[in-house]
Image (cartoon, coloured by chain):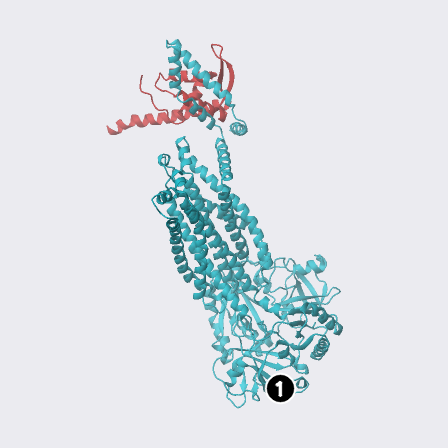
Amino acid sequence: MPPSTDLLQGTLDLLILQTLAPGPMHGWGVAQRIQQVSKDVLQIGQGSLYPALHRLEYRGWIRADWGASENNRRAKFYALTRTGRKQLETEVATWERLSAAIGLVLGGIPEAQA
Amino acid sequence: MMKEWLTRLRFLVLRLPHAELDEELRIHVEQSTEAKIAAGMTREEAHRQALIEFGGVERAREQCHEQRPGWWMGTVLQDVRYALRGFRRNPVFTFTVIATLALGIGATTAVFSVVDRILFRSLPYAHDDRLVSVGLVAPIIPQEFMLGGSYYDWRDNQKPFEAFTSETGVNACDLTERNPARLSCASVEQNFLPTLGVSPLLGRNFLPEEDRPNGPKVALISYGLWLSHYGLDPGILNRLIDIDGKQVRVIGVLPKDFEMPALESADIVVPQALDEAAERKEAPDTVMYAFARLKPGLTIAQAQAALEPVFNYSLNLAPAQFRKEVHLRVRSIRDRQMQDVYTVAWVLLGAVLAVLLIACANVASLLMARAAQRERELAVRAVLGASRARLARQRLTETFLLSLAGTAAGLVLAEILLRVFIAIAPAGIPFLEKSHLDLRIVLFTVILSILCAAVFGTFPALQCPRTATLAARATSSGAHAFARRCLVVGQIAISMILLTDAALLMRSFSSLERQPMGMETRGVLAAHIALPSYRYTTAQEQMEFFLAAEAALRRLPGVSAVGMTNWLPPSETREEQIFSIIAVSGRPRPAGGTGGMVTWRWVTPDYFNALGIPIVRGQNFTEEQRTSNENLLILSSLLASRLFGDEDPVGQHVQPVPDGPWYTVLGVAANVKNGGLTGADDPEFYRLRRNVTGDWHPWNVMVLKTSLPPAAIAPWVRSQIAQVDPTVPVEIETLTDSVSKLADRPRFETALLGFFALCGLLISVIGLYGVIAFVATQRTQEIGVRMALGATRMNILRLIVGEGVRLIVLGGVLGLGAALATAQLLKSLLFNVGPHDPATYAAVAVLLALVAMAATLIPARAAMKVEPVVALRYE
């Protein structure tokens, strides 16, 4: 198993929003999807997923509804709300700016030394 | 954004259902388990792995709950509920804390409300910080004053003021309309109101031509008079009203909060209409009171320095013997108003803050004791997962609740105390009856209590519970105990200061009450009569009225003497002159200085009989001499010895005023207290009031010696005088009452300070008792061991009492030192008692020691009675 990376503060919210962007999903699914997509690099403590989901729901960025899962089980499905979608856009933009800046800094150091 | 906030608000009220969360988590674990079974694990192993992967289910659930906006408010409520439960379990603790706080805060607030008006109120004038009272101080008039001539010189030549104005005092006047009333009329210069920055509520200020002799008669009336006499009728403007029988035009109404700078009450303000040219020329004889507005940026000291040239100029015009004793004085109007009340106000404020300090120390001490008792409980909570912040918050919540309850109770107490103060306070403390708890003062109180809570609640709250206490067999709280001992020592020291101050005032008051008056005050009734000047215009009419009244009163049964005088001792209102102008025939006038003041009064022969003043040499005046033309004097012993030494003054000739008549000394009367209760006695002489018009004035005091109860005879006196003229107002008062009224102020001060000292003592003693009782309980086990090893009950008693004695002695000695150092501040309030009176200090020390010992003996006796077996099992 590759070493897990500690999640940056607040990144979990972004990941959840991004995961929910294609369509509604239940908690277990969100955990699985983040793990698959990040190729097991980002390991989310499953326990800390639910407080985050609740936080987002309280903020009105996601909405929860009970529905039937793939194997016809009752499950709670989370979906992005309209404010949630807007929030996702701003957070993605912020993230890209930030990572671009960090990339510049990291790429720039060797040049400066050379 | 809006929607987001709405969602948040919705969740403030609603919460996501608990059951749903539980189910959601269960489903998650189930799905995880099934996925692992599908991957080939057994069911048990899969379930186990799923739970491990998930982490703490309970923790996740807690964290989910904490996501709710406003979640912390719920925990505050929880803290509050927990605190309230704790208080209910410890009613004595709760009651003591709240009562102590209430007493401290209540007393402080009430006294602050009173002194606030005296020390900090804003005056009803524009830019009152730049207004000053200016004048000369001389032995004749204690307040700064000016004389007509020099006032105009100063006004024209002064530099430091942008405006300079004067008033010539407030006199009684009569409104002689269909609804007659006795009023007070103030005479002021034309620019008086503009200088103070007061503009009339209605109408206009005086015009320059109205402030001249024989100018148009105009007046401004007070809001109070406008309300009571004219029902706030705006038609009052330009109406003619009758004052002292003359028609005066009302040109305006003064603002509601208007007051004269020296705080005299004034119903009507009229132009003083002085003849400036005449005042400048003639010997100055109009006494004026000058007020001025400083130029911006100037201080009072700078103004005083800038006035020196004009002052020196006036001084050179003054009679030679005055020059050394006359000084220039410039002071703020506030100082002029409050003069002697300042010291009292500061002393009271100091005393009450001391009580508050003691109260706060007590609360802190109690909280610490409670913290020590709960050390184990807190340790248990910490082990069960309560964070340090949470524990500290819990304790701060408790402290805050206590101080809130204490403040509420304190405010109620303050309102009650304030009403009591106002009810028992004597007249003459400015604004007392107007003081009330206003918003500022309530705010002050709340801040005080929050400070109290913050300072004394934080210290115990910040201490982290040591988990070690769980293991230890007995709790140890050495730091607590030390801090509490320090607090108790401090409390005792402050109480000592308060008690000595109160005791000094009490001793001073009792010597004030017991001092010899030089006359018999019991069974003496005084009828004060001031004849309305518009009805009794000539001295002849005035004399006839008083002679008729005297004859009428003499007919009353049970009245053995009816004397008459213009002023009655011991009040300091009296006629005065300087000593050095008195001439004795056949001797040169004494040179240098004024020799101080000499009091004199008009009397009839019965005056000495009515007041029981013995004639120690020579004779009293006789009734026959009243109809003669002889000029006769009786001297007081003090004046006789100053004028004649050991010589016999009887038969000597004396001229009290240069160019006045010569008098023959008929006798010497014993000294009478004549300068108020606390003032020094002045030498005095008595002039016989003969049946000659020059000897009479419109005001007179009829002094009756009676063997009947004063309440019974007063109506008779009234009806006798009414038979002479029913329209003349009469004020009747027993001499005992008027003497006691003079003592009202010191009595009030003594009572208040005594009350605070007792409050302080009570609270400190509770604190001392608490500490000793706590120490005794903590040492129960040790006591058991000692007794098992053979210590007697006396040894145990000594052990515990010793603890108390150390605290008492230390606190007492510290307090004694501080009291000796601060008593000097009280000096001006003390009468016949030094600020370092040894008897007072000794008595207070003994009192404090006795009370404090009693407070230690109670818990010590309880400790002595501990059964060793019980104590050893105690845990």
Q: Chain of mark 1?
A: B
- What x and y, as percent, mark residue B619? 60, 85
- What x and y, as percent, mark residue B193? 60, 63
Above/below status of B75 relative to B142: above
Q: Is residue B265 visible?
A: yes
Above/below status of B554 relative to B764: below
| Chain A palette colour | red
Q: Describe residue B742's horizontal placement relative to residue B836 as left or right.
A: right
Instruction: Residue A106: name its quadrant.
Output: top left
Circle 1 — which element?
loop
- What x and y, as percent, mark residue B243? 70, 68
Q: Residue at x 35, y 47 (%)?
A: B791
Q: Is residue A26 visible?
A: no
Q: Describe residue A105's horizontal placement relative to residue B17 as left or right.
A: left
* Foreground pick, B307 / B457: B457
Q: Residues within 10 Å of mark 1 (few under 14, many from 20)?
A: some
Work out which quarter of the rendered image holds the C terminus of chain B and state it: top left
Residue placed under numbered mark 1 in the picture: B631
Q: Residue furthest left?
A: A114
Residue type at mark 1? Asn
* Foreground pick, B434 / B642: B642
Q: Residue at x 35, y 36 (%)?
A: B472
- The cyan one among the chains is B
